[in-house]
Image (tube, rainbow, N blue to C red):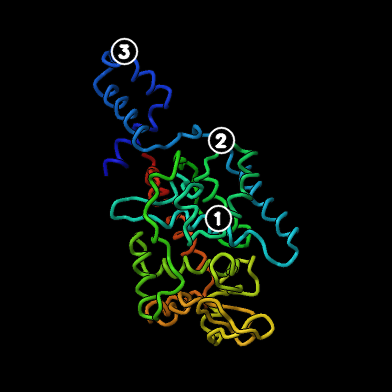
Amino acid sequence: MFRYGTILLARRTFSAATSTRLAKKPAATSSLSPLLAALAATTTFALSQDSTVSAYATGAVKESAVRAAIADLIEKDAELRDDGTALTGTFVRLAWHCAGTFAKGDCSGGSDGGRMRFDPEASWGANAGLDIARRALEEVKEKFPAITYADLYTLAGVVAVEEAGGPKIPFRLGREDAASGETSPPDGRLPDADKGTKEKTISHIRDVFYRMGFNDMEIVALLGAHALGRCHPNASGYWGPWTRAETTFSNEYFRLLIEEKWYPKKTHANGRPWKGPDQFEDETGELMMLPADLALVQDLKFKKIVEKFAKDEDLFFREYAKAFSTLLELGVPFSPRKAWYQFW
């Protein structure tokens, strides 16, 4: 509570330069009011303890311009690939994995800090392949050096969803960058695709999301982003897309879960034996589902929500927008959002 209360308020009240000058001049500090002196001292402590870098002042970054640059990057990459794939799903995964380390118990983890660009997070097995997304976004970072990596990585996921035809995601700038990965949370907080049995996998899904504060409706909504992208053997060991339109955000993932029959994958590439981890495929062998995906229809509570989303895309979009926005702000010391009718 202390770390996310007074310290962060002080950090945003005084610049790093101001705190340094105050720290070097005890006599001048003592002439301040007790409140200002306390805030100055707290600021100096916060900067040394939090190892964060205040990257830009309010209004220094034009979000619409950054959004346009990210959208342009996605489009150009898709044209170069010319195979129906794009960075869309990878950007969503990048944003997700930056934020999905949060733990409400001690408020550690989350997207604030942008720590995935450092070890240990950069080397976690769960983040394999995301170096591609981070490298791609360097082009945007060069154009807009004032934006923090923490904001850039999360905004990339938001733009990817919206450009793919998904809902408008509430988003705000203001995350700060850590100077190193020293404050990264422990490995193992991101969800695994399989825990060996149906029961263990279902329990694991809830454990991961409940740790962040999500409920079952929000869990299913967030997993609906599997409508985008595909798995790559060189990253996760798994292979294939979840849907036939992997650059289009829709409720197709839920419809396929309900309507298609899914079989254990046995062969791959001209009938050769499949040597990868356990996964499932449809009758054509062109689409796939992970054990964690099938858990959503194997658990009765999850399945009821899957059925609702399969029938009502508008409902899915509303729930996804709220849940994804919440995910990206976990652990970020933003001021609480005001209701539309509040003027104070």
**Which secondary structure lies at badge 3?**
helix
Q: Where, by quadrant of the figure, is residue 262 drawn?
A: bottom right
Residue density around tag 3, few if under 14, some if 14–19, many if 20 or more, within 10 Å: few
**Residue sitting nearer the eye, 323 or 260:** 260
Q: In the drawing, does residue 274 fall left or right of residue 331?
A: right
Q: Position of residue 18 (x, y in %)?
A: 40, 22
Q: What residue is at 28 percent from the left and 55 percent from the top?
A: 105
Q: What residue is at 35 percent from the left and 17 percent from the top?
A: 24
Image quadrant holding the N terminus, namely top left
Which three-letter amino acid code belongs to the residue tagged 1? Gly
- Please name the residue that numbered disc 2 is placed on: 146
Which three-letter amino acid code belongs to the residue tagged 3? Ala
Which three-letter amino acid code belongs to the residue tagged 2? Ala
**Which secondary structure lies at badge 2?**
loop
Residue density around tag 2, few if under 14, some if 14–19, many if 20 or more, within 10 Å: some
- Please name the residue that numbered disc 3 is placed on: 28
- Please name the residue that numbered disc 1 is placed on: 157
**Residue sitting nearer the eye, 26 or 299:** 26
Please tell me which of labels 3 and 1 falls first in the chain.
Answer: 3
Give the Cα distance between marks 2 and 1: 19 Å
Residue density around tag 1, few if under 14, some if 14–19, many if 20 or more, within 10 Å: many
Please tell me which of labels 2 and 1 falls first in the chain.
Answer: 2
Q: Do the residues bearing badges 2 and 1 touch, measured as CB atoms within 8 Å?
A: no
Give the Cα distance between marks 2 and 3: 32 Å
Q: Where is residue 241 in the image (x, y as percent from the top left)?
A: 61, 73
Question: Is residue 156 depicted above or below 247 in this figure?
Answer: above
Please tell me which of labels 2 and 3 falls first in the chain.
Answer: 3
Q: Position of residue 44 (x, y in %)?
A: 34, 28
Question: Is residue 93 depicted above or below 315 in this figure?
Answer: above
Tell me the number on the disc at residue 277: none
